[in-house]
Image (spheres, rainbow, N blue to C red):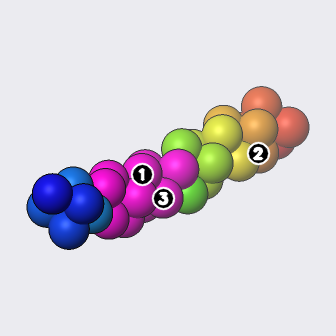
């Protein structure tokens, strides 16, 4: 049963890091826009 639960947990981490960098980029762009 442990093996069946390991695959689903590995799929969660990959999608999480992807949106994280994107969100940061948006914040940086917004900050630059405000500074300009």
Dot 1: what SS? Answer: loop
Q: Which image quadrant is residue 5 in? A: bottom left
The one of 23 and 9 positioned closer to us in this rendering = 9
Distance from Cα at disc 2 to Cα at disc 3: 23 Å
- Which of disc 1 and disc 2 is earlier in sequence? 1
Q: Are marks 3 and 1 in contact (CB under 8 Å)?
A: yes
Magenta part of the chain: 8-20
Residue depicted at x 41% and y 58%: 13
Viewer-side residue, 33 vs 16 = 16
For residue 28, say whether it is visible: yes
Q: Which residue is mark 1?
A: 16
Which quadrant does the C terminus fall into? top right
**Quadrant where the N terminus lies?**
bottom left
Mark 3 lies on a secondary structure that is loop
Q: Is residue 11 magenta?
A: yes
Q: Which mark is residue 31?
A: none
Q: Position of residue 32 (x, y in %)?
A: 76, 45
Q: Position of residue 21 (x, y in %)?
A: 55, 57
Disc 3 to disc 1, C-alpha distance: 4 Å
Q: Residue furthest front?
A: 1
Residue 3's place in the image compared with 8, above or below, is: below
Residue 32's disc is 2
29 part of magenta stretch: no
- Which residue bears the numbered disc 3? 17
Q: Nearer the viewer, residue 22 or 28?
A: 22
């Amino acid at each position: 049963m442990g093996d069946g639960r390991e695959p689903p947990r590995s799929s969660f981490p990959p999608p999480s890091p992807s949106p994280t960098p994107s969100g940061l980029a948006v914040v940086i762009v917004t900050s630059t826009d405000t500074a300009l």
